[in-house]
Image (cartoon, rainbow, N blue to C red):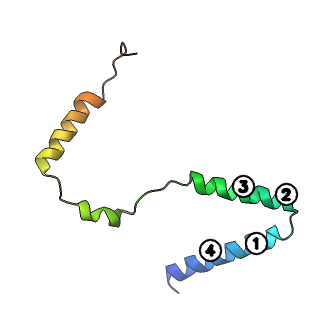
Amino acid sequence: MSPYINYMTEISTIKHDIIRQLDHLPLDFQRQVLDFAQALVKSYPKGVPGKDLLRFSGIMEPEDIQDMDKAIEESCERVDLNEW
């Protein structure tokens, strides 16, 4: 069996187990579970898969990247204690 099928089977089992457990909880506890699940979704880091970024590969010249690295090193890694 492929890892993907095992993964999908596990997800399906987890979802069914959660639903079965919810059936045994009073409504106010079910709301708490829903609130918790919604909080988890909001806190889950969002991003873009690397494969979706491949279209940007090579659009910058190596010299431009070096200039950016140099500017970051010179400006962004220093702390001016008198600034605030």
Of labels 4 and 1, the one closer to you: 1
Of labels 2 and 1, the one closer to you: 2
* Residue 11, numbered circle: 4
Pointer 3 residue: 35
Name which residue lies at 58% across and 51% down. 43
Pointer 1 residue: 19
Residue 27 vs residue 4, the one in the foreground: 27
Q: Disc 3 and disc 2: Cα gap in Å?
A: 11 Å
Q: Residues within 10 Å of mark 4 (few under 14, many from 20)?
A: few
Q: Work out whether 5 lies above or below 28.
A: below
Of labels 2 and 4, the one closer to you: 2
Name which residue lies at 54% across and 82% down. 5
Pointer 2 residue: 28
| Extreme residue toward the bottom, this view | 1
Quadrant position of the C terminus in the picture: top left
Is label 2 in contact with label 1 (beta carbons under 8 Å)?
Answer: no
